Amino acid sequence: MSARIRLLTPENIPAAVLLKDAAEWNQTALDWERFVSASPEGCFAAEFEGRLIGTSATITYEDRLAWIGMVIVDGQFRGQGIGTALLQRAIAYLDARKIPSVKLDATPQGKLLYQKFGFASEYEIERWNLERAAGEVAAAETSHADLSDILSLDRAIFGADRGSVLRSMSNAAPEFVMSKVRKGKIVGYAFGRRGSLADQLGPWMAQDEEVAASLLDEFLRRSGRERAFVDCVRANPWAIPLVQARGFQFSRPLTRMFRGKNDSAGKPQLLCSILGPEFG
């Protein structure tokens, strides 16, 4: 079978949403719009007989760090090299742009494939899942540190400016934008989004356990939803114990991987959780 690999367009978003729904992923149509608007030449579709059967997407931060995500293949067409072809197209696009560092978050199954394309492991991530009775959504305090100050700190923590994505997250779910300030200095911040399956916390950054716990509890208070996800950085000393204490259950492991230089590593030791496997 030969699938055609082409650009993914805004008109393909409804079909892409159906594809990710079948895979039971948490993204929404808005997440797809973020990719296509940010990287119109860097999102790809596999098509067979006029049907969308696979996707891959890229997003670039400051032309110094790029992300590959949303590599999905319809279950009926797996094992036929379509995912590999979509990954190759994404890598070729980023190489042509001379992006020095390319990253992604790999499942254990995908890790072996990515290693063949020169990706190396950076650190480990774990998804944790909370199932609870729906609660009353608490009113969110509107006051937090200036968003531009939060984004400036996030640039140092993440390793590149991803302000456009985080501003989009803030606009879509302002109730989940939180920060903690001590003596005029931001010591923690968090964002969140309302996914198709669960509310998701991330990025979640804190300089100590007290700040981390406060942000986590406030997110859960503002969410009230039956299900919540958080992708914890495993090396962080307090993230996983904090979510465990609140009833989260381990879901799956991920490995952050990079290809090329890792000059934009940031300060992952201060991250309790990432934004998400699709965005970094």
Image (tube, rainbow, N blue to C red):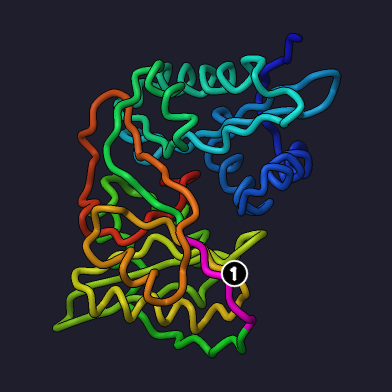
Q: Which residue is mark 1?
A: 227
- Give above or below for 70 relative to 274: above
Q: Residue at x 26, y 46 (%)?
A: 159
Estimate the x, y position of residue 114 in percent, counting from the top left: 42, 24
> What is the total number of numbered labels drawn onto the structure image?
1
Estimate the x, y position of residue 239 in percent, counting from the top left: 31, 65
Q: Residue at x 67, y 59 (%)?
A: 196
Q: Is residue 152 magenta?
A: no
Estimate the x, y position of residue 205 in percent, counting from the top left: 29, 65
| Highlighted range, magenta | 128-134
Task: Pick out the residue farthest to the left.
Answer: 183
Task: Pick out the residue farthest to the top.
Answer: 2
Is residue 236 visible in the rendered image? The answer is: yes
Is residue 171 visible in the rendered image? The answer is: no
Q: Is residue 133 magenta?
A: yes
Q: Residues within 10 Å of mark 1 (few under 14, many from 20)?
A: some
- Residue 183 horizontal side relative to residue 17, left or right: left
Q: Amino acid at mark 1?
A: Arg
- Residue 202 horizontal side relative to residue 200, left or right: left
Residue 209 or 67: which is nearer the viewer? 209
Task: Pick out the residue farthest to the right.
Answer: 49
State the quadrant of the N terminus.
top right
- Residue 35 horizontal side relative to residue 128, left or right: right
- Residue 144 horizontal side relative to residue 238, left or right: right
Estimate the x, y position of residue 11 in percent, counting from the top left: 77, 38
Residue 73 or 34: which is nearer the viewer? 73
